[in-house]
Image (cartoon, rainbow, N blue to C red):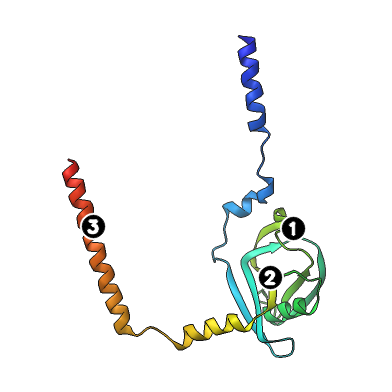
Amino acid sequence: MWQVTFSYALLLIPLVSTTTEWWGDLRAHLNPSRTPAFYDVTYDEAECPLGLRSDAIPEYVYFGTMMATMSVNEHDECLQKCAEKPRCKAVNYFHPFAYQKKGFCELLSETQRDNPRLMRPFRLATYFEHIRCRESEETDDVVDIIQKPAPVHEKKLEMNSLMKKLSTKVNEFNSGFRAAR
């Protein structure tokens, strides 16, 4: 009896010692921000004539190693300051409160991938990473989408064909369901 209980205890020890620390702070995963992550594009003629591109995570900040802090009018100033410094990998931008005119910028020498546990929810703030100059291929795709919208007539035809396919699939499903009874 004791030998069987002892062997079950040995089997449970590896299960109990597992952890999810590698995935970062569990609170951040269980409390996603109200707005999804997005790509941001800003323009600066001097350094990046095609504009800056970055990945943004709203309502989160990274509490990692800071290089510098400053007041800025807009988030694009913060991104530009980071693009000018080779060691800068990410920024935290704190939006101004009602009584403030300027936002607050933190330049970071690490990203959330360096230490995911340091990423925390924070209202009125946005975390930016992968700050880089846009390439000409990226702008060509955007221009094609903007300049070549699909005609309304083609959209109606696509919708009609989709509805026909959908109705036939629903009929197939219903007939198979009735035959199974």
Q: Viewed as shown, does residue 82 lie left or right of 169?
A: right
**Residue depicted at 74% across the width and 74% down the height:** 104
Q: Earlier in the sequence, mark 1 or mark 2?
A: 1
Tell which tag, 1 or 3, sits nearer the viewer. Answer: 3
Residue under pointer 2: 130
Residue 142, given in percent of the width and then of the height, sits at: 53, 82
- Is residue 39 or residue 165 the one in the foreground? 165
Q: Tell me the residue at 64%/21% (across/down).
A: 9
The residue beneath circle 3 is 170
Question: Do the CB atoms of the residues marked 1 and 3 lie less than 8 Å apart?
Answer: no
Q: Which residue is mark 1?
A: 114
What residue appears at the point 52 percent right and 86 percent down from the top-left corner? Answer: 143
Amino acid type at image mark 3: Val
Residue toward you, 99 or 171: 171
Q: CA distance from mark 1 to mark 3?
A: 49 Å
Please tell me in which quadrant of the rendered image residue 91 appears: bottom right
Where residue 181 appears, x then y in whole percent? Answer: 17, 40
Crowd band around label 1 with a 10 angstrom C-alpha radius: few (<14), some (14–19), many (20+): few
Asked which secondary structure carries label 3, the reply is helix
159 or 100: nearer the eye? Answer: 159
Callout 1 amino acid? Asp
Dot placed on the residue nearer the N-terminal end, 3 or 2? 2
Where, by quadrant of the figure, is residue 60 drawn?
bottom right
Relative image position of residue 119 (x, y in whole percent): 69, 58
Q: Quadrant of residue 66?
A: bottom right
